[in-house]
Image: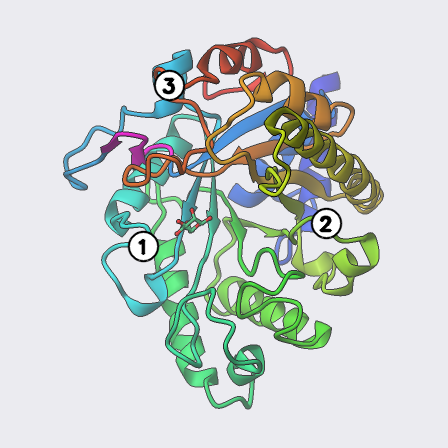
Amino acid sequence: MKNQIINTILFATAGLALGGCNAGETNPAAELFSRLEASAEKGQVLYAHQDDLSYGHTWKVEDPAADDLSRSDVKAVCGEKPAAVGFDLGGIELGAPCNLDGVNFSLMRRAAVKHAEDGGVVTFSWHARNPLTGGDSWDVSQKGVVASVLDGGENHGKFMEWLSRTADFLDSLRDSAGVRIPAVFRPWHENVGSWFWWGGNLCSEDEYKALYRLTRDYIENDRGLDNLLWAYSPNSGIDSLAYFGRYPGDRYVELLGLDHYEYVDASVTDRDAALAKADAYYAEVLSTDLQYIGNYASSHGKLFALTETGFEGITPPLWWTDVLLKAIDGHKICYVLTWRNAHDRPDHFYAPFPGSADAENFLKFYENERTVFLK
Ligand code: BMA
């Protein structure tokens, strides 16, 4: 009974937080919200890995239609798939068969649906092409791209077609009963730094907010997709003023995120000193940023997560326990996502694989009572 009352309250709260659904009603997104909220409340953190089911350090799904989706670098190391899997939609806007990293979109659909049906969580980022120049997301050669896609801008019509293709794909994420699976959608990420065409120096705060709102209004209201939790995830290394300066508003966001990576300063010649400095900086930034994001999330009924993180090549052998787990200690984030293990770039990996130097330490991370994997 007690649990029933708590569940009713949780669902009602989530329903209120989500545009288009009434208190007490449930939909896939509201249910996902409640699950994530309840597990974060218990101090649990879902482990998530980008592209985990599509390829790994030395392999790639070859047959998108027939593969049984049982492979995963993470599973090969600890015996379980991650609880959450990240996918990227970059390229869907052009109607391309594969995303920017060569992942076939029908494979992505199958993998996301299977992962959700297996009880996991799926999240989508979107490295969309530059609609003004025709370049990629990182083409920051011209300002005014965002202005050009807003209502009245020269690329508005084209951009609405892009949104329409993205909505088609998100709408096609349906289980065997034809019901849309829930997903976290995280468009226009790392938006305070200036490396994407929607970045800090490339558009005004109001233009950014308008871009985000246009995206949600179209996908949710015009297309009726109620299966999404919307994430806002700036890059790290900023303060709360910068973080919230571009926040599209509580009506538009359910999950506050942060993308924060660890890097070694190559100019420091003493490798151990460089690593110690990198570990300390990684932890310091997270402790500040997760504090203000967490405060806002708890007072505004939002989820929060470390939406991208990692150390390329995972050099410190104890990174998982001594750096990552320590840095998130005390913060009620619902998931932590480490970036992809590229199959075609041996040094570009952010999760363990059989034989990687961090694999043993990852087992400790896996066994830690806080972390949650698929089972
Ligand atoms: C970056 C790198 C790129 C990739 C992009 C989108 O961080 O991993 O190789 O194309 O993410 O997935």
Q: How crowded is mark 1: few (under 14 residues within 10 Å), some or many (20 or more)?
A: many
The amino acid type, in three-letter code, at marker 3 is Lys
Give the mark, 3 or 1, whose residue is nearer the N terminus: 3
Q: Is mark 3 on a helix, strand or loop?
A: helix
The nearer-to-camera label among 2 and 1 is 2
Give the mark, 2 or 1, whose residue is nearer the N terminus: 1
Q: How crowded is mark 3: few (under 14 residues within 10 Å), some or many (20 or more)?
A: some
Of the numbered discs in the image, which one, if any, rests on residue 75? Answer: 3
The amino acid type, in three-letter code, at marker 2 is Gly
Which x, y percent locates residue 244?
Answer: 78, 59
Is the CB of the residue bearing disc 1 within 8 angstroms of ligand 1? yes
> Along the line of sight, which residue is nearer the eye, 73 or 283?
283
Eyeballing the image, is 302 above or below 186? above
Give the quarter of the image for residue 346: top left
Of the numbered discs in the image, which one, if any, rests on residue 99? Answer: 1
Magenta: main secondary structure equals loop
The residues bearing labels 3 and 2 have C-alpha atoms spaced at a distance of 32 Å
Q: What element carries label 1?
A: loop
Verify CB contact (< 8 Å) between mark 3 and mark 1: no
Give the quarter of the image for residue 64: top left
For disc 2, the marked residue is 237
Q: Which residue is drawn at 62% across and 17% down?
A: 321
Eyeballing the image, is 273 above or below 130? above
Give the mark, 3 or 2, whose residue is nearer the N terminus: 3
Give the quarter of the image for residue 4: top right
> Along the line of sight, which residue is nearer the eye, 317 or 69?
317
